[in-house]
Image: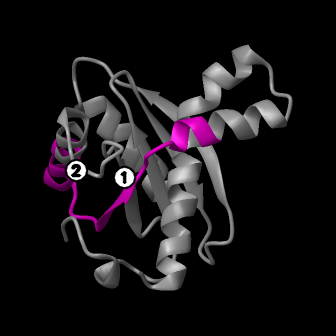
Amino acid sequence: MSIVAITDFPNSGPLLGLDPGTKTIGVASCDGIRMLASPVETIPKGRQLAPVLKRLFEIYDDRRAVGLVLGLPLNMDGSEGPRAQSVRALAWNILKHRDVPILLQDERLSTVEAESVMRDADISHKRRAERIDASAAAVILKSAMDRLERGA
């Protein structure tokens, strides 16, 4: 597999959504019928990528996922900058570790949306800070699920 077009991405089965940041990777998942995207955890990034990938694929296997959705941080004008290049490098490293289908999903404003939802739910500032990356991953995954459902 590789980074695939939406038409080549698995159309059923559980997925993981990732919000790759500079210090952490937020992880979310959905079930096989893709009704709800839920935050799972935040994986801290260190100097070595191997432990991050090990934990990522533990979650992937535990949830019997069939694909990964990576948030692609585009600029507001739709262009790609250094952060988007970093996500593409992560995708390449994931594929070197294991051959899985990867779908890139525009993640513009996903963290803002996740923060707003948690604030509206009256979640404390401390708890929001702990969960923001996983919650943003859920927003990214839900956007991709909607896109997959529409077939767009």
Residue 49 versus residue 126: which sits nearer the camera? 126
Q: Amino acid at mark 2?
A: Ala
User: Would you say the residues marked 2 and 1 are in contact, meaning their CB atoms lie under 8 Å apart?
Assistant: yes
Residue 120 versus residue 64: which sits nearer the camera? 120
Q: Residue at x 19, y 71 (%)?
A: 1
Q: Is residue 13 above or below residue 42?
A: below
- Give x and y (percent) for residue 58: 43, 47
Is label 2 in a helix, a strand or a loop? helix
- Give x and y (percent) for residue 19: 43, 41
For disc 2, the marked residue is 91
Q: Residue at x 30, y 19 (%)?
A: 46
Q: Is residue 69 above or below residue 22?
A: below
How many residues crowd around disc 2 within 10 Å: few (fewer than 14), some, or many (20 or more)? Answer: many
Q: Label 2 to label 1, Cα distance in Å?
A: 8 Å
* Residue 93 as seen in the image, left or right of residue 71: left
Q: Is residue 134 above or below residue 129?
A: below
Most extreme residue toward the top is 126
- Give x and y (percent) for residue 16: 47, 57
Which image quadrant for residue 23?
top left
Residue 66 versus residue 92: which sits nearer the camera? 92
Which image quadrant for residue 99?
bottom left
Residue 99 shows in the view: yes
Q: Residue at x 46, y 65 (%)?
A: 65
For disc 1, the marked residue is 70
- Which portion, as a residue range, is magenta? 89-113
* Residue 86 as seen in the image, left or right of residue 76: left
* Residue 51 as seen in the image, left or right of residue 27: left
